Image (cartoon, rainbow, N blue to C red):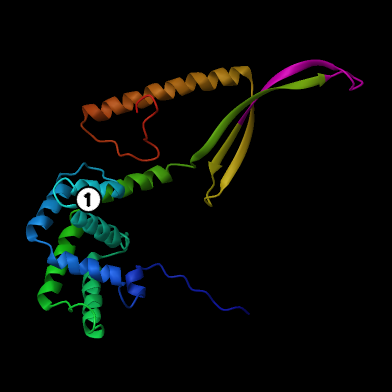
Amino acid sequence: MGDHVIYLRTPRLLLSGTLSDEEIEDFRELASVSDELIQSAMQLLSDAPRYLRPSDLENLFLRAIALKEAQLLARLIDWLRSFQGDDIDFGVTIPRIIERLKGHQSTDAEAKPAFTATALEVIRVRIQEIASSWGCLDRQKKAETVAKATGRRLQSLHLVCDFRPIFDSERTEIDGFLPVTTMHIVFEGADGLPNGLDVILSEKDVEFLAEHAEFAKSKLAALKRAANRLNTPIPSTDLTKPSIEEQ
């Protein structure tokens, strides 16, 4: 009998006894930056669009702070959010982070100066402030989750038009050709792997698809106008990327 395998869904911080050297250095820098810089960055987050992609976070910070600090804060937020989930309580996670930093303080005496009690308190307060300021990132994550959960995503679509020969009774001569349109669809299955589907379309079916595609474009435009009138932003996801014409 093979060994049993147990899968645990839990933040990696709870499984790791230490932080990496890069993570330690990031927290050391977090403790050393000025309060004014932190406040400027948190104000930028507060004033950010309702939906903000994590990849845009660094550019957001660059509006008011230097590149090094912008990269630091973007990196720390990305690291902290990797622990986030419906079952993650930052009231529990943040004290564990501080405990890891204390552990580094007691076991790494020959490295850079250890974290002082004052520095640890500064880090704790700043992590708490940062973790309560990224609502725009949380809303973006929810929007992307909804976009993924709405149905099986289309990966590719091809309409292939060709002739199918009609042979005579002896199968030696071609009496005619039958135009055929095949719609080949590849979509993402429930397991994340691609699935394919072929559908034969009549000429009326092709006309029907073209007509209803125009209807769908008109409906989408109406929905966007309604969102604008309601002053409700539309998050940028794979479902809402603008068309080539709009770009």
Up the image or down, 11 lies above or below 150; here it is below
Name the main secondary structure of what is drawn in magenta.
Answer: strand
Of 1 and 34, the residue lying toward us: 34
Q: Quadrant of residue 72?
A: bottom left
Q: Quadrant of the N terminus?
A: bottom right
* Residue occupied by mark 1: 135
Q: Residue at x 75, y 22 (%)?
A: 164
Q: Nearer the viewer, residue 172 or 213?
A: 172
Picture quarter with the C terminus: top left
Q: Residue furthest top?
A: 175
How far across and down, in percent of the image, does residue 162 sit?
Answer: 68, 23
Secondary structure under the numbered disc 1 in the rendered image: helix
Q: Left of 153 or right of it: where is 111?
A: left
Residue, far left: 36
**Number of marks:** 1
**Magenta includes 4?**
no
Amino acid type at circle 1 is Gly
Q: Residue at x 30, y 73 (%)?
A: 19
Indicate the position of residue 57 as horizontal and vertical percent values.
25, 49
Residue 8 in the image: state x and y as whole percent: 42, 70
Residue 221 placement, left or right of 68: right
The residue positioned 18% from the left and 54% from the top of the image is 133
Residue sitting at 92 percent across and 21 percent down? 170
Q: Is residue 219 left or right of residue 49?
A: right
Q: Which residues are magenta?
A: 167-183
Residue 181: in magenta span: yes
